[in-house]
Image (cartoon, grey):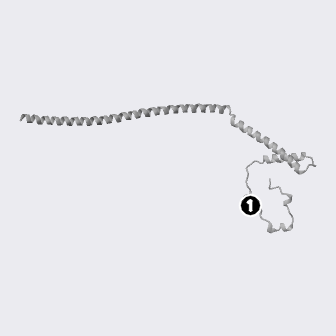
Amino acid sequence: MHDSVQLVHVVDLHADHTSISNMIPYDQYVKDIDVSVVHNNASSVPNDTFMMIYNDMCESIAPSVSNSSRNAVVKNSLTAELATYREQIELYERRAKFELTKHEQKINEQLRLVISDRNFKEETLKRELHSTKLQLTSIINRNKSMVEETIFLKQEFKQKENKLLADFLNMKSLKEKVED
């Protein structure tokens, strides 16, 4: 689009500006322009719309109106239209955010049910795990107590056995003395 348009004030036919030393090849010009141009993927439709509105407004204003007042009218009109578009966009975004289709509502409800069911199962498993931990702790403590009691009984038995063995040996030695 911009390649075919050449502004009138840019063209200068003075001989000193058109000498060979001032010219660069087209390929070099394109390369230089490609480097310095910032590419924009935005649509040109808003710009075209702006220009159409601007042209319409300029045509509708009487030729006797000064440029500054014409610009003020155009600016005010465009500002009002921009505000209207912004309000419409904001309203649309709010509606799009909160209005769900029936399909989305069903999916939402199913997800709520799945999540509440999962939360209930998780709480149940937590309670069961806590109960199992308490039972396991109780069994471990009972086993420790039984081990300690067994050790104590073994020691007591050993002491009684040693005492009875000593008493038996004493009686045997007394019996031998008595028989002698």
Tag 1 residue: 32
Q: Residue reaching furthest left? A: 180
Q: Is residue 61 left or right of residue 157?
A: right
Question: Looking at numbered disc 1 in the image, what kind of residue is underneath it?
Answer: Asp
Residue 52 at least partly seen: no
Q: Is residue 8 left or right of residue 175?
A: right
User: What residue do we see at 55% from left, 31% from top?
Assistant: 117
* Dot 1: element: helix
Q: How many marks?
A: 1
Quadrant in the rendering for residue 174: top left
Residue 112 at least partly seen: yes
Residue 53 point in image, percent of width and height = 84, 45
User: What residue do we see at 32% from left, 36% from top?
Assistant: 148
Q: Nearer the viewer, residue 119 or 172?
A: 172
User: What residue do we see at 46% from left, 33% from top?
Assistant: 130
Q: Is residue 169 left or right of residue 49?
A: left
Quadrant in the rendering for residue 25: bottom right
Residue 105 point in image, percent of width and height = 65, 32
The vertical placement of 178 against 12, above or below, is above
User: What residue do we see at 74% from left, 38% from top?
Assistant: 91
Q: Nearer the viewer, residue 113 or 126?
A: 126
Q: Residues within 10 Å of mark 1 (few under 14, many from 20)?
A: few
Q: Nearer the viewer, residue 75 or 4?
A: 75
Residue 116 point in image, percent of width and height = 57, 31
Q: Residue reaching furthest right? A: 64
Residue 142 point in image, percent of width and height = 36, 33
Q: Is residue 86 left or right of residue 163?
A: right
**The C terminus sits in image quarter:** top left
